[in-house]
Amino acid sequence: MPRMKLTKAAIDSLRITDNTRVTYWDTELTGFCLRASQTAKTYYAKGRVKGKPSWVKIGEHGLLTPDLARRDARKILSDLARGVDVNKGRREEKTKGIELEEIMEKYFVARPNLRAGSVTSYKSLISNHLSEWLKKPMDEITGEMVSRKHLEIASNVGQAQANKALRVLRLLFNHLSVIKDKPIDNPVIRLSRARQWFKEERRQSLIKEHALRDWYDAVKEYSNPVAIDALLLLLFTGCRKQEILTLQWSDVDMEDRTITIRAEIAKNHREHTLPMSDMIFDIFNQGLALRENEWVFPGQGPKGHLTALDQIVATVIKKSKIAFCLHDLRRTFTSLAEQEVSYAVLKRLLNHYTGNDVTAGYLIISTEQLRAPMQKITNRIMKACLTKETKGKVIPLNRGKA
């Protein structure tokens, strides 16, 4: 490495003509250097911390004179010699006082594979329930504040929303710990220590088998055929709302009679391919006649596809007198399917993670092996929907434009 006394005249005369970066060591102060390239000339100090080399950036030539940079280098080298990790200290200083809004954006950048629905949900929970904290430095949020806010949200909105909002805050504090590269006191732990988390009962609602006939009759009378198809597919596939509404025609193989839930859409980020039963095939086949764009369920909004089914749900509830939410259709599918197929097949159909189930990890069930079970489940659902009009067969469902 070249050595020279770092002076303004000497540094100004340096010319780097290729894409390399050259380090010039100062002859006056050991550990002080200048790194020069075609585009920049930067002062550094190099020492060791706990036996490991540490390069500490001082500043750009021009903004700093060599004498000022050398003075700063002496202090840095002295700190390094005493075991002070200067770079770590700088990182901590940089993150000191970081605001909740900023750490939330940093979290999303660091999690590029996070589903769009999760991003929307997290932002909504923070903006709806913790909006007054968005500009607050994270280190100013205390356990007492968290405890009060948790109870306040529960009182105003509900216990489930209170738990969800504070869980998001907890993961943002955990991400702050990652950024700082050291453990921090997460104030949300106060809720665990005080046993303040609200107990949440897993929702068990579904459409009872004997009620499916009235529900189906109300669905097929709705005016929008695209919404009808989406609602029926939720019931006959057991898929989640976003998995169905974001289906593209490229995910649908009419020749092989399969549909594929892309990994970026699936809740567990695993691609999931399902066979079509006759009913499902007919729904897609009829939907092809209404194809408008690349989305199976086109919509009028900026995304190009349906994003909600609120209107059809409200209409069906009013007409059938059967209260339900979209996820009830997945529970209904599961309830009927478990009476027709094995547990292993059901888990595969639902794309459920096997977790620590070692045996399940050895059960490789192909899409083709699911075809007969899927048809069997469809037959069970259609039998429940049977009326004199349908006689268990698929009928045209208002295929005119809405």
Image: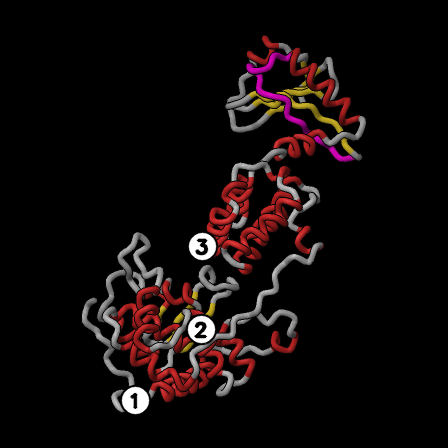
Identity, as a three-letter code, of the amino acid under mark 3? Ala
Identity, as a three-letter code, of the amino acid under mark 1? Thr
Question: Foreground residue, 141 or 300?
Answer: 141
Residue 387 is tagged as 1
Q: Foreground mark, 3 or 2? A: 2
Determine crowd level at label 1: few under 14, some 14-19, many 20+ residues with C-alpha closer than 10 A. Answer: some
Estimate the x, y position of residue 238 in percent, counting from the top left.
44, 74
Estimate the x, y position of residue 393 in percent, counting from the top left.
29, 87
**Horizontal side of residue 400 vs 131, given as left or right:** left
- Which sits earlier in the primary sequence, circle 2 or circle 1? 2
Q: Evaluate if marks 1 and 3 touch, with contact meaning CB atoms under 8 Å apart.
A: no
Q: CA distance from mark 2 to mark 1?
A: 22 Å
The residue lying at 32 percent from left, 73 percent from top is 318
Q: Secondary structure at mark 2?
A: helix
Please state the extent of the stretch shown in magenta in the rendering: 51-66
Q: Foreground mark, 1 or 3? A: 1
Q: Is residue 48 visible?
A: yes
Identity, as a three-letter code, of the amino acid under mark 2? Asp
Q: Secondary structure at mark 3?
A: helix
Mark 2, residue position: 328
Mark 3, residue position: 116
